């Protein structure tokens, strides 16, 4: 295939990828969009295989077979609650692949027409080192994110003294090494650069706590795109450049949306150290002497059965307890009783953007019953029951009233405006931000202590 | 006037000059050919052209992604993950030549990793999207 022809097919593949993202503007068109993505990828791979450089196929076929089998197997078996760690793991693979391609281009530049060993073009060296550095950071960063989400290491932020200083020093070293590599093309500089980037990726994500993972995953998503673009520049391949740019900007936008959902700057998140991973009751906040009204599943069933409208507010606790199916059963019975049931999703609920939406969809909840914060927040005032299941910080009114609170300014779901608030929670422990939620002590609040799934099942029993 | 000795001197001087000229010409033609061949080595689209493509694509991405409904942010993430594995294009070229080299092994590893991602990413996206249905 001539160079012009393959460039033309790469263009078609780029357009397919754009259409794939475009399809996601609505659930109706999304599946067609995904098909576009698959077609684009197919065109890209076949076009490359038909270029004159590629003459030996056995290793390629072996690689695609091994990788394809593993990928298919994982994707078919994965539980939807484990989606965030899956995506993190996949990001790490893109990063590592970028590193491998950069290493191949460095040791065998003739393949890509960017010069010969020892005198690679200057601009290619810059692009190559950037692509590899970003790829390496994506790789180790995603591995850490995966370990945190999978529970292999604590989700608590790991901080040590002088952390930011170490990171800054490594960052400076990184730039220095790139400059050294570009001017000398020395192999040791290349491999040292790889090591420093790997270390930096690890250290950047370690201090970030579990509930900030939506931002981290989005950020790594963005990085994997920029890494692909960097490699695209190195190889002068416009398809890689376009795709990298698309993915990079997509991840950046998601990071922005997530940060806005927490009213924190990206720097605040990246610097880390925020959050406690729940569990600890805020010390000395007078927990013992305030009255909490706790109820049983029967009480909750009675209240909701007699309500005319219920808004369900799911959070990460629902995902952990795998309560989405039991919850939907509960909602189905309530709907049969003539109750208007809707769902309200906070932008940062769960461990990745849109996590709750996927879980509800998995449980067969129709997507037109699920609403975003801005769409539904006004309706809490005219709602009988807010059913908060596994969420805490995103309902805390301190975000609106207490300027000294760490979550002050974060947009919250106004559940306190509902006539009755039901909180399904395992204990009185504070949420991720380590802030006490004064809603628990209000007169119109009833705490339903227990596992989210069991509680829903008991309510279902009581309703029947 | 016509001193044979000085005449001979003059003749040898001219011969020297002629040979020097010939040498210069040789050098010049050589330079000319190398000048003609070098652009072919530098070749390919210029950096500015690539940068243009990149910046325009960032803008396309920006506008397309803002239109994605928040409910589908998880599928967005997995599908962008799948398409960023288009890096396999670079890996295929590295794994493509005959013989065995370090670059070829790197290419093989990258092809395998990217294939995990491509298959895994698109399938898990499809699984997710299948769930987003309007009921009744």
Image: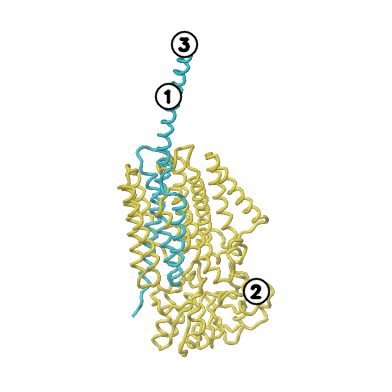
Q: Pointer 3: what residue?
A: B2
Residue A405: mark: 2
In three-dimensional space, the C-alpha distance between marks 1 and 2, rounded to whole angstroms, equals 88 Å
Left or right: A193 as drawn, with respect to B108: right
* Letter of the chain that mark 2 sits on in the rendering: A
In the rendering, what colour is chain B? cyan
Q: Is residue A9 visible?
A: yes
Answer few, some or many: residues within 10 Å of disc 2's Cα (few below 14, many 20 plus, some between 14 and 19).
Answer: some
Real-space CA distance between mark 3 and mark 1, rounded to the nearest whole angstrom: 29 Å
Q: Which mark is residue A71?
A: none
Mark 1 belongs to which subunit?
B
* Residue named by callout 1: B22
Secondary structure beneath label 3? loop
Answer left or right for A155 relative to A81. Answer: right
Q: Position of residue A225 (x, y in %)?
A: 46, 57
Of labels 3 and 1, the one closer to you? 3
Dot 1 falls on a residue whose secondary structure is helix
The answer to whether residue A451 shows anywhere in this view is no
Give the colour in which the image draws chain A.
Answer: yellow
Q: Secondary structure at mark 2?
A: loop
Above or below, A148 against A278 in this view is above
Vertical relation: A28 (above or below) A269: below
Label 3 vs 1, first from the N-terminus: 3
Vertical placement of residue A107 versus A17, above or below: above
Q: Separation of disc 2 and disc 3 at Cα?
A: 113 Å
- Could you say which quadrant of the image residue A445 lies in? bottom right
């Amino acid at each position: 295939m001539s160079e012009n022809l393959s460039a033309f097919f790469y263009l078609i593949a780029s357009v397919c990828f754009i259409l794939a993202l475009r399809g996601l503007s609505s659930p109706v068109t999304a599946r067609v969009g995904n098909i576009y993505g698959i077609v684009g990828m197919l065109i890209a791979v076949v076009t490359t295989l038909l270029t004159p450089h590629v003459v030996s196929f056995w290793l390629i076929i072996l690689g695609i077979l091994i990788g394809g089998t593993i990928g298919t197997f994982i994707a078919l078996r994965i539980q939807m609650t484990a989606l965030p760690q899956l995506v993190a793991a996949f990001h790490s693979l893109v990063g590592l692949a970028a590193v491998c391609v950069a290493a191949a281009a460095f040791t065998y530049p003739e393949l890509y027409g960017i010069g010969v060993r020892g005198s690679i073009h200057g601009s290619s060296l810059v692009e190559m080192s950037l692509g590899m550095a970003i790829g390496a950071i994506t790789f180790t960063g995603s591995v850490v994110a995966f370990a945190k989400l999978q529970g292999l290491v604590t989700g608590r932020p790991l901080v040590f003294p002088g952390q930011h200083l170490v990171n800054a020093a490594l960052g400076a070293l990184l730039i220095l090494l790139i400059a050294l590599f570009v001017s000398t093309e020395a192999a040791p500089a290349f491999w040292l650069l790889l090591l420093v980037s790997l270390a930096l990726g690890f250290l950047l994500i370690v201090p970030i706590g579990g509930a900030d993972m939506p931002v981290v995953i989005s950020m790594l998503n963005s990085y994997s795109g920029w890494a692909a673009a960097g490699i695209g520049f190195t190889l002068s391949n416009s398809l890689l450049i376009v795709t990298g740019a698309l993915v990079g900007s997509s991840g950046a936008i998601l990071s922005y949306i997530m940060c806005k959902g927490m009213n924190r700057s990206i720097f605040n998140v990246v610097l880390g150290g925020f959050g406690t991973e729940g569990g600890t009751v805020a010390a000395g906040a007078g927990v013992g002497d305030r009255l909490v009204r706790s109820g049983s599943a029967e009480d909750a069933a009675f209240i909701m059965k007699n309500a005319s409208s219920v808004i369900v507010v799911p959070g990460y606790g629902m995902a952990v307890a795998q309560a989405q199916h039991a919850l939907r059963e509960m909602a189905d019975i309530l709907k049969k009783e003539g109750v208007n049931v809707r769902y309200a999703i906070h932008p940062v609920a769960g461990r990745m953007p849109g996590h709750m939406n996927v879980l509800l969809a998995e449980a067969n909840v129709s997507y037109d019953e699920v609403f975003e914060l801005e769409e539904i927040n006004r309706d809490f005032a005219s709602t009988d029951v807010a059913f908060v299941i596994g969420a805490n910080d995103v309902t805390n009114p301190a975000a609106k009233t207490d300027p000294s609170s760490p979550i002050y300014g974060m947009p919250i779901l106004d559940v306190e405006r509902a006539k009755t608030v039901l909180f399904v929670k395992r204990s009185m422990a504070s949420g991720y931000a380590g802030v006490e939620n004064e809603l628990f002590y209000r007169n119109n609040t009833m705490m339903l202590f227990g596992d989210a799934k069991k509680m829903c099942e008991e309510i279902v029993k009581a309703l029947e | 006037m016509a001193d044979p000795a000085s005449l001979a001197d003059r003749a040898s001087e001219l011969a020297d000059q002629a040979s020097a000229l010939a040498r210069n010409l040789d050098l010049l033609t050589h330079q000319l050919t190398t000048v003609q061949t070098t652009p072919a080595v530098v070749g390919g689209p210029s950096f500015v052209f690539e940068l243009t493509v990149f910046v325009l694509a960032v803008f396309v991405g920006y506008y397309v992604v803002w239109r994605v409904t928040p409910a589908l942010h998880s599928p967005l993430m997995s599908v962008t993950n799948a398409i960023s594995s288009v890096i396999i294009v670079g890996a295929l070229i590295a794994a493509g030549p005959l013989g065995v080299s370090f670059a070829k092994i790197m290419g093989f590893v990258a092809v395998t990793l990217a294939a995990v991602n491509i298959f895994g990413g698109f399938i898990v996206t499809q699984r997710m999207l299948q769930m987003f249905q309007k009921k009744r």
